[in-house]
């Protein structure tokens, strides 16, 4: 009887699977923690060392515009990395999509909406080809997309010379889209009326004639925010998001559980290609031309921003918001150095250091949370 009473007095042990984690543990499990901490450190560094104009509204727009263009690529690349694959052709895809877009407008005379559709379809098809080669041959996506990096860059050179009669730059974009109302969705500034009103009420800086120093928000920043929010919603609130994590974490187990791994991965390759096409459309319309060097090395910068944002190279772990912050860090450093007395060539040093520190930090956090050694 005594033994029975003693056993009854022992509290049942709670299953670790249902044990509620503390707030600190929950925060440490978030993949974007490293990028957010890095952003705070970088902002603090430039707040101390840079000219104060960097933190004005005009300075913020100058930083965010290149960050937004890289960020759209990085968010798409982060989803693909979570799915367990890489796309090293994404930078060359920007140039190749710019070729398709420019030729459709200038040489074929398509309306802007038609050229956009043709560009997105063309990029999507190449992304699907990338995905299918990886799936059917079981070659590493690193090798397949590295091959397409050179193929697409070469096709862009050949195609531009064919379209222009020998030049590697295609001009005349502004002339053919000048009357299109759709152009404002992909180029220029948004919310111009709001900024004019803010200047009239002395809420933002303006010139002596009353014109605001910042005329609006660059459209690329609007697209950046929309893509980040949409990607985060897909990852965290939809079945497709669960499939992406499962496909990258353990493809065989995912297949056994009914996840269409091959379709998910193919779709992610299409997504990265279309993200590159979107950047091509935005940059071509802003510049009024396209050239063979567009998107050069953006594939590496996008992957680095994704890694800084918490994506693991092994797949199955990452965050779109992390890539969002990682791209902003890029913008801070690449533009911020011009506001300091440091040589801008230090950007390359910072790039490598941030990549290494991000990987070390993410591994440290994962081991602390999971108990790995």
Image: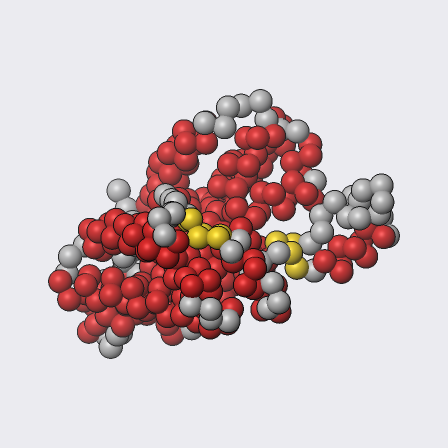
Q: Observer-nearest residue: 234 or 194?
A: 194
Q: Residue at x 13, y 62 (%)?
A: 137
In the rendered structure, the answer to whether residue 354 lies left or right of residue 66 reads left
Residue 57's image quarter? Answer: top right
Q: Is residue 206 visible?
A: yes
> Residue placed farthest to the front in the image?
165
Residue 235, above or below 148? below
Total residue callouts? 0
Q: Position of residue 372 (x, y in %)?
A: 28, 46
Q: Position of residue 330 (x, y in %)?
A: 48, 41
Scheme of colours in the image: secondary structure
Q: Observer-nearest residue: 188 or 66?
A: 188
Q: Is residue 71 visible?
A: no
Q: Observer-nearest residue: 94 or 300?
A: 94
Q: Residue at x 37, y 38 (%)?
A: 355
Q: Residue at x 46, y 49 (%)?
A: 70
Q: Position of residue 339 (x, y in %)?
A: 61, 30
In the rendered structure, the answer to whether residue 136 lies left or right of residue 158 reads left
| Image quarter hosting the C terminus | top left
Residue 314, above or below 123? above
Q: Residue at x 44, y 60 (%)?
A: 102
Residue 213's image quarter? Answer: top right
Q: Position of residue 38 (x, y in %)?
A: 49, 40
> Residue placed farthest to the left in the image?
137
Residue 265, above or below 95? below
């Amino acid at each position: 009887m005594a033994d029975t009473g003693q056993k009854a007095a022992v509290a049942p042990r709670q299953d670790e699977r249902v044990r509620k984690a503390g707030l600190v543990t929950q925060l440490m499990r978030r993949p974007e923690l490293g990028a957010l901490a890095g952003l705070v450190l970088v902002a603090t560094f430039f707040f101390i060392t840079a000219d104060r104009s960097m933190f004005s509204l005009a300075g913020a727009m100058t930083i965010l515009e290149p960050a937004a263009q890289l960020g759209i690529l990085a968010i798409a690349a982060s989803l693909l990395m979570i799915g367990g694959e890489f796309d090293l052709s994404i930078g060359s895809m920007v140039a190749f999509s710019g070729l398709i877009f420019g030729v459709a407008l200038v040489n074929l005379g398509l309306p802007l909406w038609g050229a956009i559709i043709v560009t997105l379809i063309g990029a999507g098809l190449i992304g699907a080809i990338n995905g299918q080669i990886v799936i059917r041959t079981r070659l590493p996506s690193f090798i397949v997309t590295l091959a397409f990096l050179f193929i697409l860059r070469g096709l862009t050179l050949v195609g531009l010379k064919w379209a222009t009669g020998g030049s590697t730059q295609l001009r005349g974009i502004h002339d053919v889209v000048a009357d299109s109302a759709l152009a404002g969705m992909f180029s220029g500034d948004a919310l111009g009326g709001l900024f004019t009103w803010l200047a009239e009420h002395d809420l933002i800086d303006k010139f002596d004639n009353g014109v605001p120093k910042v005329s609006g928000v660059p459209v690329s920043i609007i697209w950046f925010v929309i893509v980040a929010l949409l990607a985060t919603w897909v990852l965290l609130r939809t079945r497709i998001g669960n499939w992406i994590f499962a496909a990258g974490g353990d493809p065989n187990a995912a297949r056994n559980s009914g996840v269409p791994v091959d379709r998910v991965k193919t779709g992610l390759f299409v997504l990265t290609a279309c993200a590159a096409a979107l950047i091509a459309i935005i940059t071509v319309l802003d510049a009024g031309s396209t050239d063979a060097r567009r998107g050069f090395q953006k594939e590496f910068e996008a992957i680095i921003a994704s890694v800084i944002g918490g994506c693991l190279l092994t797949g199955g772990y990452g965050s779109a918001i992390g890539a969002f912050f990682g791209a902003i860090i890029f913008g801070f450093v690449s533009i911020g150095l011009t506001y300091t007395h440091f040589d801008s060539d230090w950007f390359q040093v910072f790039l490598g250091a941030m990549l290494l520190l991000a990987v070390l930090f993410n591994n440290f956090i994962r081991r602390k949370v999971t108990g790995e050694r």
